Image (tube, helix red, strand yellow):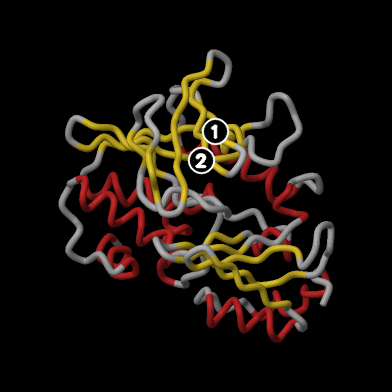
Amino acid sequence: MVSQYLQLLGCENASAVSEKNLFLLHEKHLEYIPYTNYRIFFNAETPSLDLDSLFERIVLRRQGGYCFELNGLFADLLRSLGYKVTEYFARWHAGETAEIPMRRHRVALVQCGNKRFLTDVGTGCLIPCTPLEFVPDVIQKKNVRSYRIVKDPVFGNLVQAENENGFYTLYSFEEAPYFPRDFEYVNFYCSQDPASPFRKKLFLHKQGREFRIFLEPAAPDSPALCLCEMRGGEILKKAITSPGELHSIFEKVFGITLPEEIFEETEKIHF
């Protein structure tokens, strides 16, 4: 299983525990395994978090996934390679209006030598292309923006990104370890509750050091979608005009062949 996973990432020679290999695995995971919630959005399917099921869907069938799937399987890969991994249950802040947002994100802290690194390969927005060293108040430049981790008396650790207005919080977590079964009930909420953001919006995203490709509304509050590609400082947008075009984007751009039953559900998208 490990060899197949490493082959998918193009990292067959990165099995030894090292900071260099950890960074490479994280970067290639973001580049080759897309973030998506299509099974939840189209079918209200609750994805199994069983490791064998995750491996079958993400590695063998190359179907992508969202945070509870991607970060869960990546944590297992790192453990299998010999890294010490602790998983945390994070509160997602970006775009939320609640004063105390709910815990609905899964991240991991990885011990490598005498350093600890925060890994996250399961977010549908621009995130660090390589792990963040787990040190407070140090600005760390990654890909096209800077990040930092800030201690907070209420939320524990704030993971923040910088934009033109300064730093804003992506998510927060306290350093109480969680285990795979602890994520099950929120995975169920995210997939089944009509109020869940994963039921309301189709996410499809991947990124590398030099690019980011994703779906977004064609206009503010529009149900129509466009494909966006960022390279350097430029962004190209292309409207998606038919179900066939959307299916082609899944397959040719993100490497995901949609199951046959999904074809009938595209009326949820306005073209």
Disc 2 crowd, CA 10 A, few/some/many (<14, 14-19, 20+): many
Q: Horizontally, is 75 left or right of 171 in the view?
A: left
Where residue 21 appears, x then y in whole percent? 22, 53
> In this figure, which residue is indicated by the disc labeled 2?
106
Q: Residue at x 51, y 52 (%)?
A: 69
Q: Which mark is residue 139?
A: none
Kind of residue at disc 2: Arg
Which one is nearer the viewer's eye here, 2 or 214?
A: 214
Figure quadrant of the N terminus: bottom left
Kind of residue at disc 1: Ala
Q: Horizontally, is 70 left or right of 66 in the view?
A: left
Q: Residue at x 51, y 28 (%)?
A: 158
Q: How many marks?
A: 2
Q: Earlier in the sequence, mark 2 or mark 1?
A: 1
Where residue 231 appears, x then y in whole percent? 49, 68
Where residue 179 appears, x then y in whole percent? 45, 34
Element class at badge 2: strand
Element class at badge 1: strand
The correct choice, above or below, for 200 with respect to 95 in the image is: below
> In this figure, which residue is indicated by the disc labeled 1?
90
Q: Residue at x 53, y 34 (%)?
A: 182
Figure quadrant of the C terminus: bottom right
Q: Kindly check if marks 2 and 1 are in contact, taking CB atoms under 8 A apart as contact.
A: yes
Disc 1 crowd, CA 10 A, few/some/many (<14, 14-19, 20+): many
The correct choice, above or below, for 67 with respect to 168 in the image is: below
Q: CA distance from mark 2 to mark 1?
A: 6 Å
